Image (cartoon, rainbow, N blue to C red):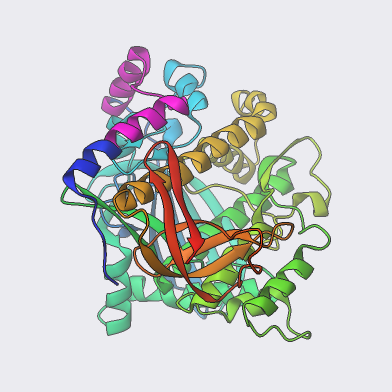
Amino acid sequence: MRVTDASLADTALLCGALRELRQRTDVPADFPAAAEAEARSAARDPRLPAEDATALPLFTIDPAGSPDLDQAMYLERREPGGFRVHYAIADVAAFVTPGGALDTEAHRRVTTLYFPDTRVPLHPPVLSEGAAGLLPDQDRPAVLWRLDLDEYGALVATDVRRAVVRSRARLDYEGVQRAIESGTAAEPLSLLRDIGQLREERERDRGGISLNVPEQEVVVRDGHYRLDYRAPLPAHGWNAQISLLTGMAAAGLMLDSGTGVLRTLPAAPDGAVARLRRTARALDVDWPHHTSYAELVRGLDPHRPAHAAFLQECTALLRGAGYTVFDGTAPAPGDALHSAVAAPYAHATAPLRRLVDRYVAELCLAAAAGRPAPDWVRAALPALPAEMAAGERRAHRVERECVDLVEAALLRDRVGELFDGYVVDRDEDRPRRGTVHLCDPAVVGRLDAAPEAPPLPLGHRLRVRLTAADPGHEPVRFVPA
C-alpha cells in the first residue's frame, strides 16, 4: 500500500487543529499542583504488599512504544494436565489515596485520551509511565491473579492477592507473533497461542464473539502523520483472551460476593440481526440460514474488502455497553450478561488507563479474601456508571475527530481528485448517502450521491471524487465520480 504523508505545512496546521480539538472537548490539561505533588510522593513511597512474587519471570505484551504497562503474565503447564496463568495487574491503589487530590483528578479524567501528537493520561506520568507501570527489572506492587485452567482451557480455580512482582521482558505484538510462528519462543510465551486458541474455542462454545475488525489508525513517523489500516495479528487475539479470562473471573468473584460493578451489554435489539443479513446479501457475504451470527463472524477474512465492510457493520451490535453496579443483591443472570462475551464480565486489567478497573480490583481482592468491600469503594459505586459513560463518550469523540483531522490534512490539497474505494455503509432511509473506504490512502469518508442517482452500491468498488477536506472545519467528503 502506498502511504501519503502530510507535508510539513500540513503538520503544523494539524497540530494547531489538535490543540483546538482539546479545548473544544474540554480535555484536561496539566494535572493540578496538589495531584502532581501527591503522585511524586506516592512514587517515592508506595504502599507495598507483604507477599514477594518477584521470582515469577513475568513479561509484558503491548504495542511497540506503549508507555503505560498495566499487565504482565507468566504461563505454565499444570500436572497432570491443564495450564496456570499468572497475570499481574498494576496496583494503582498502592499510590492513590481515596478522597485525595490524585483520586479526585482521576474521577475527573476517567480514561486516558490518545491524540496523534500527545496523550492525556489518567494518572501523572510519574506513575503511569514510571512507578506504577510494570516496567522490566523493577519491583512493583501488583494485583496478582492466578487462574488455573483444565486441558480444554476452562477455568477451574481463581486466586487473586496483592504481591510485589518484577517483569523480566517488555515484548511487543509483532515480535511475539514472529517468535511463536518461527518456533523460537520459550514455552511461557509459546503457551500464549495454546491457551489463546483454547479460550477462543471456549468462546465459540458459549456463543461469544470477538470481532477481528481492521482499524483505521493514525501513525506518526519522523514528525509526519499518516493513516494506515491495521488488521489485528493472531497474537492480539490470544492476548485479549487472557484479559477476557481475567475479566470473567473477576465478574464471578463479585457476583458470588454480592457487591460489584460489571461491564454489561444487552442482547441486540429486534431487527438488528435481520438488518445484518440484508447487509451480508448486499456485500455478497455468504451467510447460510443454518449458520449463527457468531459462527459467521469467526469465518470472515478482514483482509477481504467485502468482509472488512461487513465486520464494520457488525460493530453496531456492540453499541449500548455500560456498567451495572450491585451491592447486597447480585443482578439477575440476564442483567449481568455481556452479550458479546456471552458471560458476565468486568473491566479489570487496565487500571493505569481506565478508572473503573481500580475499583474492580478492590472488590475482587475483598471477595477472594472473604471480607467486605472497603467503605470507600462501596461509596463510589453508585456514581461509577455515569462517570464511565461520560468518559467513554469523550474518548470516542476524540478518537473519531482525531482521525477526521488527519484525513483532512492528508487530502486538503487534493480536492477534486479521483480515488478508488469500496462502499462500506449505506443509510437505510437514505440509500444515496453512505460511507466509502478508500483503497489508498487509508481514509474512510462520507459519500453522497445526487438525488437522481441510483442507490449506492453497498460492498462494491466505486470511483469517487473528493469534494471537501478542511482540517478543523470540514471532514473529508466524496461523491461518486
User: Magenta part mainly helix, strand or loop?
Assistant: helix
Asked if residue 20 lies in the magenta stretch, the reply is yes
Residue 154's image quarter? bottom right
What residue span does the magenta drawing correspond to? 15-44
Asked if residue 226 lies in the magenta stretch, the reply is no
How far across and down, in percent of the image, does residue 394 sit? Answer: 52, 35
The structure residue drawn at horizontal position 80% and vertical position 57%, both measured from the top left corner, is 269
The structure residue drawn at horizontal position 43% and vertical position 27%, both measured from the top left corner, is 27
Q: Is 33 or 189 nearer to us in this picture?
A: 33
Left/right placement of residue 106 relative to residue 183 reads: right
Q: Is residue 375 above or below residue 410?
A: above
How far across and down, in percent of the image, does residue 151 sit? Answer: 56, 79
Q: Is residue 372 visible?
A: no
Q: Is 61 or 291 nearer to us in this picture?
A: 291
Q: Is residue 24 visible?
A: yes
Residue 121's image quarter? top left
Left/right placement of residue 278 relative to residue 400 reads: right
How far across and down, in percent of the image, does residue 435 sit? Answer: 55, 60
Q: Is residue 22 above or below residue 428?
A: above
The structure residue drawn at horizontal position 60% and vertical position 59%, both measured from the top left corner, is 450
